[in-house]
Amino acid sequence: MEKKKGRQVTPEDTAARTCLKVLAALWMFLAAGMPVFSQCAPNQTAFGHGESITYEVVYSWGPIWIRAGRVKFKTDLESNKETPCWHITSTGRTISSIEFLFKVRDVYETWIDTSDFHTLEFRRDIYESGYRLENSSWFDYPDGIVISHTKRNDDPIVLDTLRMKSCTFDMLSSCFFIRSMNLDTIREGMSFPVHIAIDDSVYTVFVRLLGKENAKDLAGIRYPCLKFSATMVEGTVFEKDEEAIVWLSDDPNRIPILIEAQLIVGSVKALLKESKGLKHPLSPLETPR
């Protein structure tokens, strides 16, 4: 199987202007490139079995903020072909009141080997206002390739063989990998390349630590955070050189508290709504009343 030249422009690249924007930021901003595959595994994980994190997505058009959707992440310990794995699922959906404008029903899943943090399999099933995409990817780290099957709407299945770059992740494993890194060694202003396999290509996103700053969740509770920017490459759901800003909790959980991204018209935010089953207690600056 050969990788086809270039990437076909699809409705997926242009239509996702509300909660899928934030989904992409959540999944794509978090993973610093490392020299070789053997160094990609964290020493320990910042998450555990039964973790569940939910975000509220809001969209602004001028001074007006509109509730757009909800994104949920869930982590479980399972077995994939007799290999102990982290099974991570993320679902995104728009709220009913705006679905006459744009309807999203997205499911992302990854199975990550607990011993070396290598992705075994990644799937996503996307529905966006009539547009369907089904993608499955299998990661072969010894040979340095990703086998990808992609089907758009009623088109035939497209088979691709992608060549990995150093520490290539899928969308979800990248996020959970960075949570478990030793971020205390990263200095303000440092930037890192991120390599993520998406459909028929391996994309690079550049991530930079902007410093430390407090951020509020949906309830208005403030948390001390590490503030990152991520510059998206042209050809993804983001425009060329577009940035997403992410506030990551400055505690052992390292979960996003707030994410912001600018759109062609307006902007979008994802705010932490609820967290359950965290491995460590969150450390807010303010205690909920």
Image (cartoon, rainbow, N blue to C red):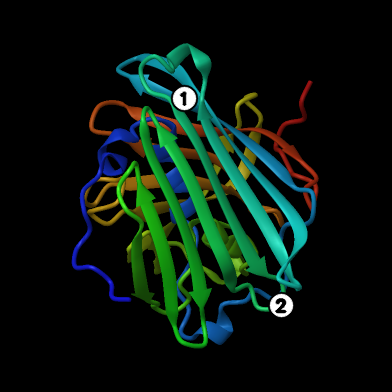
> Of helix, strand and loop, which one carries label 2?
loop
* Rendered image quadrant of residue 264: top left
The mark that comes first in sequence, 1 or 2, is 1
Task: Give percent across and percent down for residue 217.
Answer: 61, 31
Q: Which mark is residue 115?
A: 2
Q: Is residue 258 above or below residue 280?
A: above
Left or right: where 234 falls relative to 56: left
Give left or right: position of 104 versus 180.
left
Crowd rating for badge 1 (residues with CA inside 10 Å; few <14, some 14–19, many 20+) = many
The three-letter amino acid code for the residue at tag 2 is: Ser
Of the 4 image quadrants, the one containing the N terminus is bottom left
Of the numbered discs in the image, which one, if any, rests on residue 58?
Answer: 1
**Looking at the image, do the residues carrying marks 1 and 2 touch, with CB atoms under 8 Å apart?**
no
- Identify which residue is drawn at 43% across, 18% down: 99
Is residue 89 something that shows in the picture?
yes
Marks 1 and 2, Cα distance to the nearest angstrom? 37 Å
Which x, y percent locates residue 151?
37, 51
Q: Tell me, yes or no, if residue 45 can be seen here.
A: no
Assign a secondary structure to mark 1: strand
Q: Give the numbered dot on residue 168.
A: none
Residue in the image at 28% along x and 44% along y: 13
Tell me the mark number nearer the camera, choosing from 1 and 2.
2
In this rendered view, identify the residue nearer to me: 95 or 208: 95
Q: Name the residue located 71 percent from the left edge and 71 percent from the top edge.
A: 81
